[in-house]
Amino acid sequence: MAAEQMAESGDRAEQAPPPRPLDAIDRDILRILQSDGRASIRSVAERVHVSRANAYARINRLIDDGVIRGFSARVNHERAGQGASAYITLKIVQNSWRTVREQLQALPGATHIALVSGDFDVLLLVHTPDNRTLRELVLTRLQSIPEVLSTRTLLVFEETDLDPGPGQIAEPPPDAEPLL
């Protein structure tokens, strides 16, 4: 399912209109929905001091503009039977990102994939039931992808999801030009 969401969000990002600047109300709405994706339109409207119709329209615009990519549950992977987690760095053949991304999206337990700069090309976060399954995923599945030149696995000993706070949605500088 995560792979489907990433594929959909990647497709939407290519089709989305150019970014519009977010005002203070938009940023407040995003903070509320990041901390509680199940918040009702009414409660969002009350908390940001706008009408329900205004809150509804703003949330729909944020969805249509691709700012909000979806709503999901924050999962405690250990309690969900996914006790082994790892960040895996990959070096890949130049210009093979799209092909590799499709194959990584199909991996069981893959929850985040990023094309990055630096000493490696891709950062992959996976959650598996145990280390044996993690080893199988790395040694058999990942390293059998022809475009993957090398991998490095970083075991996660403990993780903490950060609640969205004031720093999560950056405030524009006071003298920022509006985006067109």
Image (cartoon, helix red, strand yellow):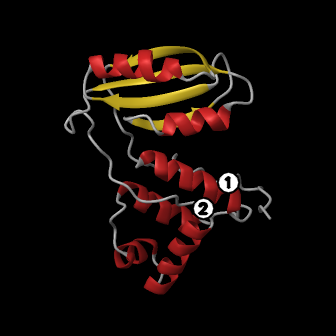
Q: Residue at x 46, y 59 (%)?
A: 70
**Is 160 placed left or right of 154 in the picture?**
left
Vertical placement of residue 96 versus 152, above or below: below
| Residue type indicated by callout 2 | Gly
Q: Can residue 166 be seen in this view?
A: no
Side (left or right) of 66 relative to 176: left
Write the residue at 45% across / 23% down: 141
Where is residue 162 shown, x and y percent of the image? Answer: 39, 40
Q: Is mark 2 on a helix, strand or loop?
A: loop
The residues tagged by marks 1 and 2 sit, at their Cα atoms, a distance apart of: 19 Å
Number of marks in the rendered image: 2
Residue 163 pos. (x, y %) = 38, 46
From the viewer's perspective, tell me whether residue 19 is left or right of residue 110. right
Q: Which of 141 and 70 is in front in this view?
A: 141
Instruction: Look at mark 2 in the image and give the residue it sits on.
Output: 66
Task: Evaluate if marks 1 and 2 touch, with contact meaning CB atoms under 8 Å apart.
Answer: no
| Quarter where residue 11 is shown | bottom right
Q: Which mark is residue 172?
A: 1
